[in-house]
Amino acid sequence: VIEYRPILPYTPPGWTIMTPVIPVPSKFSPEILTNTATILKEKGFYHIALYYYEKALEINPNLKEAWNNLGELYNRLGKYNEAIKCFEKALNIDPSYTPALVNKGIALAKLGKTKEALQYFNKAININTREKKAWYNKAVLLLSLGQHKEALKHLTKALQIDPNYKQAKSLLMILKIKHQN
C-alpha cells in the first residue's frame, strides 16, 4: 500500500512542481522501517530516510534505535539542535544507550560545546569500555583542543578495540606525518 497526499499547488509560470512518491509498506514493523531508513540514509536518500524514520516512530515512539538514527541523519544534515533532541529522546528511553551518548557528544562538539561533548564521550566509555566510536571521537575532540598526547592515547585505544577502524587509522597516519615534520 502506498500512502499519498493530494496536493493542489499553485504553479508560477515557468515552474514545475515535483512530488516524490514514497512507498511505505502498511504492515511492516517499525524495526523494519527503521532498518530500511538506515539503508536509505547510508545511500544518501536522506529525504526518504527521514520519512521512514518518522513513520517508524509514529508506530512505536519508544524505539531508541530509530530516535538515534534519526538524530544521526540530522547530524549529517548539519541540524545539530534537532539531532540533540532525537538523542535525548533515545536516552530518555535508555539512559545507558551508548550510540546515542556518543552521537549526542558529536552534535555538541559540532556546536562548540566541547566540555559537554567530552562528558558524553566519557559517559559512553564508562558504560562500555569497548565503544570504539567514543574513544575515536574523544581523540578528535582532544586534538582540536591541542591535547595531542592525550588524543593519541584515545586513538590507540580505539584501534586496539578494532584494528581495522578506518577513520582511526587515517587519523593516526595524519598524526604520524605531522609528528615527523
Image (cartoon, grey):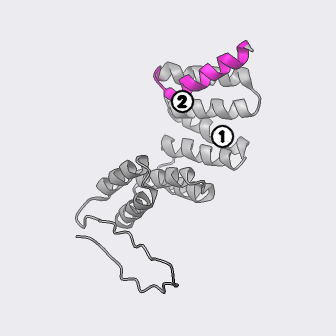
**Residue 172 painted magenta:** yes
On the rendered image, what quadrant is the C terminus found in?
A: top right
Q: Does residue 91 appear in this view?
A: no
Residue 141 lies in quadrant = top right
From the image, state whether disc 1 or disc 2 is nearer to you.
2
Query: How many residues crowd around disc 1 within 10 Å: few (fewer than 14), some, or many (20 or more)?
Result: some
* Residue 162 point in image, percent of width and height: 46, 23
Mark 1 lies on residue? 119
Residue 52 or 94: which is nearer the viewer?
52
Q: Is residue 158 positioned above or below 76 on the image? A: above
Task: Report if residue 104 is visible in the image.
Answer: yes
Which residues are the magenta region? 162-180
Q: Residues within 10 Å of mark 2 (few under 14, many from 20)?
A: some
Q: Residue at x 66, y 47 (%)?
A: 110
Query: Is 43 placed left or right of 29 in the picture?
Result: right
Q: Nearer the viewer, residue 139 or 181?
A: 181
Q: Name which residue type carries label 1.
A: Gln
Q: Position of residue 17 (x, y in %)?
A: 44, 76
Q: Residue at x 40, y 48 (%)?
A: 43
Dot 2 amino acid type: Gln
Considering the numbered disc 2 on the image, is that residue within a helix, a strand or a loop?
A: helix
Image label count: 2
Residue that carries the numbered disc 2 in the rendered image? 167
Q: Please tell me which residue is depicted at 45% across the width and 56% down the height of the picture.
A: 46
